Image: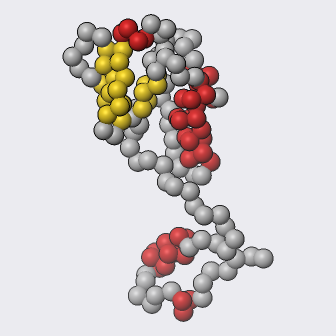
């Protein structure tokens, strides 16, 4: 059965044409799935520390609203949304970054993944699963 919009008398009379269209567009169709949560509006920075001796050169600590990454010998910490240590696997990063981004795109939102790192370190493999 085809969904029909609410009758004109059900809409508030003070609405203009644009407001009425916006209201109708925001109403769920009968039998439609509930909308999912909107993706975050801010840039998220995710870091993966991979060298096998990373414990000796990088420390990762949980902070307020994200993780704190500090390089050995540096007095400047880096605040990131999420940091993955050397024991993390490709699947962990894909499930945290790649999969949600794909889902957002499939729901009609925009998403971008910018991966930076050494050649052959697994950036593309991580993002594509």
- Residue 127 visible in the snapshot: no
Residue found 53% across the figure and 35% down from its top: 96
Residue found 25% across the figure and 13% down from its top: 74
Quadrant into which the N terminus falls: bottom right
Expressed as whole percent of the image width and height from the top left, the position of residue 88 reads: 53, 22
Residue 109 appears left or right of 128: left
- Residue 106 visible in the snapshot: yes
Between 5 and 40, the one lying in front of the other is: 40
Quadrant into which the C terminus falls: top right
Image height check: is 40 above or below 54? Answer: below
Image height check: is 23 above or below 106? Answer: below
Identify the colour scheme used.
Answer: secondary structure
**Residue 5, quarter of the rendered image:** bottom right
**Residue 13, quarter of the rendered image:** bottom left
Expressed as whole percent of the image width and height from the top left, the position of residue 103 reads: 60, 45
> What residue occupies the far bottom of the structure in this picture?
9
């Amino acid at each position: 059965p085809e969904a029909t919009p609410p009758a004109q008398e059900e809409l508030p009379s003070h609405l203009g044409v644009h407001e009425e269209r916006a209201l109708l567009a925001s109403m769920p169709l009968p039998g439609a799935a509930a909308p999912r949560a909107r993706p975050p509006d801010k840039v998220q920075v995710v870091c993966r520390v991979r060298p096998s001796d990373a414990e000796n050169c990088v420390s990762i600590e949980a902070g307020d609203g994200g993780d704190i990454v500090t390089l050995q010998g540096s007095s400047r910490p880096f605040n990131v949304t999420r940091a993955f240590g050397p024991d993390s696997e490709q699947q962990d990063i894909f499930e945290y970054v790649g999969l949600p981004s794909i889902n957002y795109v499939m729901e009609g939102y925009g998403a971008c993944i910018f991966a930076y790192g050494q050649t052959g370190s697994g950036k593309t493999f991580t993002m594509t699963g």
